[in-house]
Structures are given as C-alpha cells and as structure tokens.
Image (cartoon, rainbow, N blue to C red):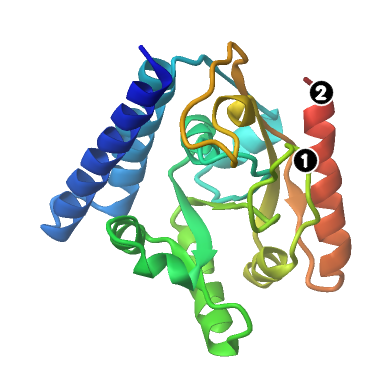
Amino acid sequence: MGRALRTLLAVLYTGACSAFGIVAMGLRLVDGDWVMWNIGRRGWSVPLLKHVVGVSTEVHIHSDTAALAKSKQGLVLVANHTSLLDINAAFAASPTPIVFLGKAGIRKVPLLGKINELAGTIFVERGNRQSSEKAVKTLTQTLKDGRSVLVFPEGTRSKNGALKPFKKGAFHLAAQAGAPIVPMHISGTHSHLPPTAWAFQKSKEPIVVRLGAPLTSTAQDVTATMEEAKSAVSALSAAE
C-alpha cells in the first residue's frame, strides 16, 4: 500500500471514529471514559498504528506507575512531542483512559474540537487567570475520577526529534491539583510522520513508549519539578 493511500485511509478512519464518538456522547449513550478507552484506544489508535501505518508498538511501564494506575489514581503524563502520531501512541500505551490538556483554540477546530470538549479535554487560555482556575478544578476532578491527563509541555512538535524546552503551565496546574507527574517518552513516530511531512514515510522503526516512575509535583518550586520531569523524559530516551 502506498504512502499517499495509507495517509488518506488514516484521515478517513480518524474522521469516522471521531464522528462516531461525537454521536455516541451527544446522544448520551456512553461517557467520555468509554469513548477514550474503547474508541480512542481500541477502535482508533491501536488499529491505525498496526494496520494503516503498519508499525509495531512496544510499551514499557514502571512498576510504581502501573500500581498507581491500577489503584485508579489519575496521572499527569508528560511526554515529548515529535509527530501527530504521538497521540495514537499515547492512547495505545496509557494504562488508564486519557484526556488532554490543550489550548483553548482547539475548541474551534471542526470535529476535533467538539469530540475533545465532550470527552473532557481540559482547555486553558494562556494568560487568563479565570481560565487557569477553572482548569485546576477540572483537572482535580478528572484525576479523582481515575483518568490520566496527557500533556506535551514543549508546546509544539520538535522538527528534528530533539527535546525542546518545557513550558511551566502544566506543572503549575499539576502542583495545584496535587497530582503525580509521570514522564513519558515516545520514539519511532517521528520517522513515520515527521512534522514537515504531509504523508507517512517509509520506515521499519517500531514505536516504543516508556512510562517512567512517578514524580511528586510541588507548588514551592515549579521550575525544579519541570526540569526534573524534562530530565526524566530524556533519561527514558537513553534507555532504549
């Protein structure tokens, strides 16, 4: 199957899964957790990576993180970001249902914005105190419900695959919510769909996702927590 055809199938399949999720939640047939786990993970991400992209996925989870997830403790997953496929890789690897911490502008994106809103994405408007306070309350409740929140603290995809500086926003929210932070490193996605490409690239590199040991967030020194998380994500990449 050619790269262009694979890419077209991925777009169509993504649209179909998103539409199904919106209808199901709009009619209140299912909740956001069900959609994120059964559609986001099982119905969309795992089949898309395996059958459309044609890549194998390996997942490694630290025992302490696995224990927290098993106890229904919500986690703040802090991951590197090099490709649009990182979202699928995170869905496929997370031991709990996940939602996203995203920019308020995502709400305006057709289809994607609506399914994120219905599924529980936490939207934050940068520089808006009221938005931040609301995000903290939503984040706290989300974690209490046993969901994990996925954050890409670099703020954008890395074009060369190297880890970019982290932004503090997510760490402020995690500290105020008293949430454990789990470093996540995703490799292999960049070779299949780098930010500069419009179609899947030919690559035999597997996708490998590693979730490290949980870190304790602290409001006393957010910068130190952020740097510790960045170092932990970097260390996970060196473990491969």
- Locate residue 40, reporting x and y percent: 35, 39
Q: In the rendered image, is residue 212 in sight?
A: yes
Give the position of the C terminus as an image quadrant: top right
Please give the count of numbered marks on the rendered protein.
2
Q: Is residue 124 left or right of residue 19?
A: right
Q: Secondary structure at mark 2?
A: loop
Of residues 24 and 80, the one nearer the viewer is: 80
* Residue plotted at (38% across, 61% down): 120
Of residues 201 and 177, the one nearer the viewer is: 201
Q: Is label 1 in contact with label 2 (beta carbons under 8 Å)?
A: no
Q: Is residue 86 left or right of residue 219?
A: left
- Locate residue 153, reporting x and y percent: 68, 56
* Residue plotted at (38% across, 29% down): 7
* Residue plotted at (32% across, 31% down): 8
Badge 1 density bin: few <14, some 14–19, many ≥20, Cα 10 Å = many
Q: Which mark is residue 239?
A: 2
Which residue is labeled 1 in the image? 233
Whole-Å distance between the Cαs marked 1 and 2?
10 Å
Three-letter code, disc 1: Val
Q: Is residue 226 left or right of residue 111?
A: right
Give the position of the N terminus as an image quadrant: top left
Three-letter code, disc 2: Ala
Q: In the rendered image, is residue 70 in sight?
A: no
Badge 2 density bin: few <14, some 14–19, many ≥20, Cα 10 Å = few
Of residues 199 and 162, the one nearer the viewer is: 199
Q: Secondary structure at mark 1?
A: helix
- Locate residue 85, reporting x and y percent: 51, 35
* Residue plotted at (54% across, 36% down): 197
